Amino acid sequence: MPLDPSQYEQLKLDRPTEKVLRITFDRPETYNSLDATGHRELAYIWRDIDDDPSVNAVILTGAGKAFSSG
């Protein structure tokens, strides 16, 4: 089943190339720190990736100046 990016508020999803999913932590105002919502979304995204046969590789990155402050 294809991923639905609208299910995630703090993770931005895009496909830079075929079979590759890029996940961007999208809270640059907090240096992409993870709150309860971010932790939950990060846990659920892996389940959704497992269910999507079109994803073979994942890139994790952060919006703005930092990958993540924690």
Image (spheres, rainbow, N blue to C red):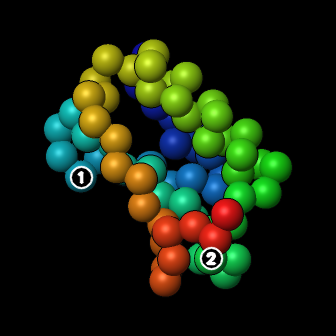
- In the displayed structure, would residue 18 be above or below residue 28? above
Q: Which residue is mark 1?
A: 16
* Residue 22 in sight in this render: yes
| Residue 41 position within the rendered picture, expressed as x and y whole percent measured from the top left | 66, 41
| Residue 16 position within the rendered picture, expressed as x and y whole percent measured from the top left | 24, 52
Q: CA distance from mark 1 to mark 2?
A: 23 Å
Type of amino acid under label 2: Tyr
| Residue 57 position within the rendered picture, expressed as x and y whole percent measured from the top left | 28, 36
Q: Which quadrant of the figure has residue 31?
A: bottom right
Q: Which quadrant of the figure has residue 40?
A: top right
| Residue 52 position within the rendered picture, expressed as x and y whole percent measured from the top left | 39, 20
Left or right position of 39 against 20: right
Secondary structure beneath label 1 = strand
Which quarter of the rendering shows the N terminus?
top left
The residue depicted at 44 percent of the width and 19 percent of the height is 50
Q: Which residue is mark 2?
A: 31
- In the displayed structure, would residue 27 be above or below residue 8? below
Crowding at dot 2, Cα within 10 Å, few <14 / some 14-19 / many 20+, comes out as some
Q: Nearer the viewer, residue 15 or 41?
A: 41
Q: Nearer the viewer, residue 42 or 70?
A: 70
Left or right position of 38 against 17: right
* Residue 27 in sight in this render: no
